[in-house]
Amino acid sequence: MQRRVPSQKKASAFPWFMAAIGAGIVFLIYTAVYASGVLSQSTLAIEHWLLWRPITRLDCSFYEWRHLGEAQVTAAVLLILGVLCMLAGHKKRVLIYFLLLLGVSVAFELGGKMAFDQPMPRTLRSGMTVLTCPQMDGQPASVQVAAGLGLLGQVPDPPRKQVSWAHDVAQMPIGSVMDDSESSYPGGHATRWCLAGLMLAWITARYLRPRFLGKILAFIFTIGSFLGGFMQFYIGVHFITDTIAGYLLGITLACCGIGLLILTEKGRAPQVTPISPERHPGRDAAIGLSRR
């Protein structure tokens, strides 16, 4: 069976690179709008509304799962994916590409946090801290592991006074006094969850057999790549604007990574079957007469 020739690889990778360019342009436009301050009040209003949500032990699981979006964990995941891709027939430089994409995500995250901040009232910040599972402070590592595993029976209940305070803050007007700020744009966890999750989804759909199982898992990984960033917003670690920006940047890098994966597939030269001349009685007879 013939493998794809380089021109066919480029044709297959082209839509992914175009998708990366499109998502990147949307990210830059969104960042420009964010920098203008137009989204500031609506961002605070959404965070203010979030304080009404139920505060439960499940928040502690989300808080522990945030570690899966750390740069070190993402690097380990990408290295594993790179090795699997090499075993599947990709060139070794795919590992370098993966790490470069991760480096770009970290660079944008650090640069954004240095360049932008979100003004906010100090009372709103104090209410947001209640969403981040404050009852885990001072708990032993065994309780943190239990929360990460979803064993909520071993997790303390949210402090009633703090829950009551968060709901009190939700009833207060936001006001115009912005005596605090938060530098969290873009959401690094949302970026890395999308980067690793979407690439894992593509790899699963392409190589896992049977195909229907690969497609099911690819769908699950795609949903999971967005849930990782949403959890950061849900527990008040990031604003909704941070999360959206992280999604856009993660999609940009993931589409670029998929395009690079297609280009690094090892191709073999097309096998050409030699054509043997068919024997024809009339032609053979004519050749015989001409040789006499």
Image (cartoon, grey):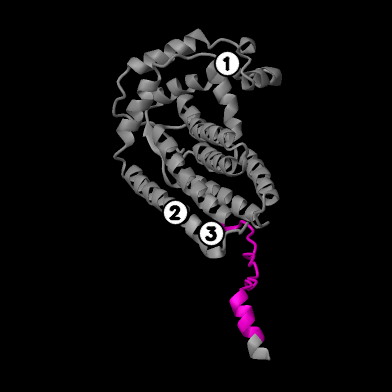
Q: Residue at x 43, y 20 (%)?
A: 127
Residue 42: x %, y % from top left:
31, 31
Q: Residues within 10 Å of mark 3 (few under 14, many from 20)?
A: some
- Label 3 secondary element: helix
Q: Residue at x 50, y 27 (%)?
A: 231
Tag 3–tag 1 contact (CB < 8 Å)? no
Principal SS element in the magenta part?
loop
Q: Residues within 10 Å of mark 2 (few under 14, many from 20)?
A: some
Label 2 vs 3, first from the N-terminus: 3
Q: Residue furthest top?
A: 160
- Label 2 secondary element: helix
Report the residue marked by disc 1: 135
Report the residue marked by disc 2: 15
Label 1 vs 2, first from the N-terminus: 2
Residue 278: x %, y % from top left:
62, 71
Q: Residues within 10 Å of mark 1 (few under 14, many from 20)?
A: some
Front of the two marks 3 and 1: 3
Query: Is 93 inside the magenta-drawn segment?
Result: no
Front of the two marks 1 and 2: 2
Q: Residue at x 37, y 46 (%)?
A: 31
Query: Is 267 inside the magenta-drawn segment?
Result: yes
Report the residue marked by disc 3: 9
Amino acid carrying label 3: it is Lys
Q: Is residue 90 visible?
A: yes
Label 3 vs 1, first from the N-terminus: 3
Residue placed most toward the observer, 160 or 178 = 160
Residue span colored magenta? 263-288
